[in-house]
Image (cartoon, rainbow, N blue to C red):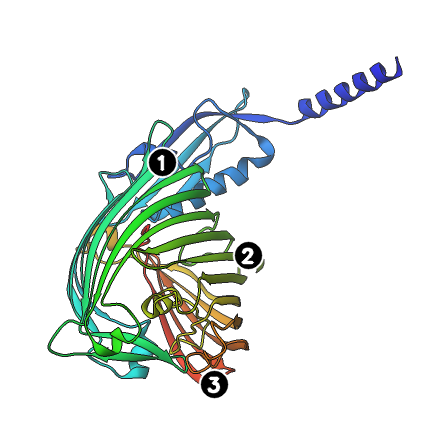
Amino acid sequence: MRKFLLVLLQMLCLSGLMAQERYFRVADISISGNEKTKPQTILREFRYSVGDSIPEAILDKEIQNFTDNLRRLMLFNNVEVSCTDADSTGAVAIGVNVTERWYYWVYPILEIADRNLTSYFYYKDFKKINYGVAFDWLNFRGRNEMLNFKVRLGYKEHYAVSYQKPNMGKNKRSGIWVRTEYFRQKKEIASVSECKPVYAENENKYIRRMFDAGAGYVFRPDMNYEFSLSLTYQHIRSNDSLLLSSVLPVQNFLVPALTFDYDNRDSKVSPTTGLHAELDAKVFTELASKTFAFASLGFEYNTPICCDRLFYHGALKHSQLFGSYDGIPTNKQIELCRDNLIRGFDYYYIIGRNFSSFQNTFSVKILKRRDFMLPKWIPSKFRNPYIQIYVDMFADLAYCSNFAPDFEAENPLANKLIYSAGAGLSFETYYDRVLKVYAAYNGNFNFFGVFVDYRTPIYKKF
């Protein structure tokens, strides 16, 4: 009898709590400003549909999540999501107003063929210029698809065609991408000595050619995370004595890969809030030879600290190569360790079996968003730029383990603490363009340098 009374009392308490929680019913979702974008592409980013009920306690949070999800699509210059007050029946109406971007990009290519502008001027190899033409059709058919063609000549020739399609299937949770591309070069990194590249070069013939073709399947069960499975085939031909001292004349790789991505940031390029986590694992099977693998894990955390003026950005990364030193070709060591980088080390290639880094940045917004109206003869998609400016202060740490006991000649930073610190300015404008200029102290090589980093908004699945 006592147990029965206790159960009855618990049920009464729970029912009382449930009665206190208020729900709002979504009576309508209206969308405006979407001239090209299909309504279902926008509605896919909201957890609720017309007729669903939302707890009052999380309504504001869900509206903000909807806004952030739409911003991360990178299809709009402006996103505004509003919600009316509930009527007597508890019904609310949600309004979405977007300003679409320009989606058809046919543009000439003129770019440096180096990590960044700083490295380009440091090594003073002014032949490292790429030029050509590219066509990017973003938001193809209004469904957030992307079609790309590229013909690039110069230092690193690149010919490519690719297609990306998300939101497939009845529940719009699946996606695919396919690509094929061809590279060829007359100058290429053959090895690394004391963390600096050693080049092979022949002005009369191409010393490296690579054909690359791949396809992938993407599954997005939730707004904030997705899984990707892909398979890529790579065919590489090398034709130079310096290159052939460390790689075979012909290399054929099958590369299955698995990726997990979680993202609830308010922006992919210049976030101020949210978490991003990514796991990437690849297995390189060289036909008629050995197999090795590569994996990387990264976390990024962004949060405001004070008065929408001060922000913290933290990033943790770990990458690892699986395989013997002799079993991983030199060109793949360089390729897979290319992103082993912290600020102030832009000139260097840090080659090693494991690489871990921790980057910390405090940003102070010294100029809040300022919008401009350009003359009417400028196309409407480019008529409303804005600018925000931040002062950044940072300190970075890293550690890289060695491949083998006699590997110090390639990487004198192995098995040592790698560190840098500095400050700079970040300029953010529309179309997610971000220009960073900063001064950094390189603690391991004991020098100060000025560095430039420019970020563009085109994010692809490959």
Labels 1 and 3 touching (C-beta < 8 A): no
Residue 322 appears left or right of 395: left
Mark 3 and mark 2 in contact? Answer it, CB < 8 Å.
no
Amino acid type of disc 1? Ser
Instruction: Tell which of 238 and 369 is nearer to you.
Output: 238
Quadrant of the rendered structure where residue 438 is? bottom left
Badge 2 amino acid: Thr
Q: Quote the CA–CA distance across marks 1 and 3.
A: 48 Å
* One can see residue 378 in this view: yes
What is the spatial separation of the Cα atoms under label 2 and label 1, in whole angstroms?
Answer: 31 Å
Q: Percent from the top left, x then y, of residue 417?
A: 56, 76
**265 or 32: nearer the viewer:** 265
The correct choice, above or below, for 204 with respect to 217 in the image is below
Give the x, y percent position of residue 106.
16, 55
Relative vertical location of residue 187 with respect to residue 273 in this rendering, above or below: below
Q: Is residue 331 above or below residue 30?
A: below
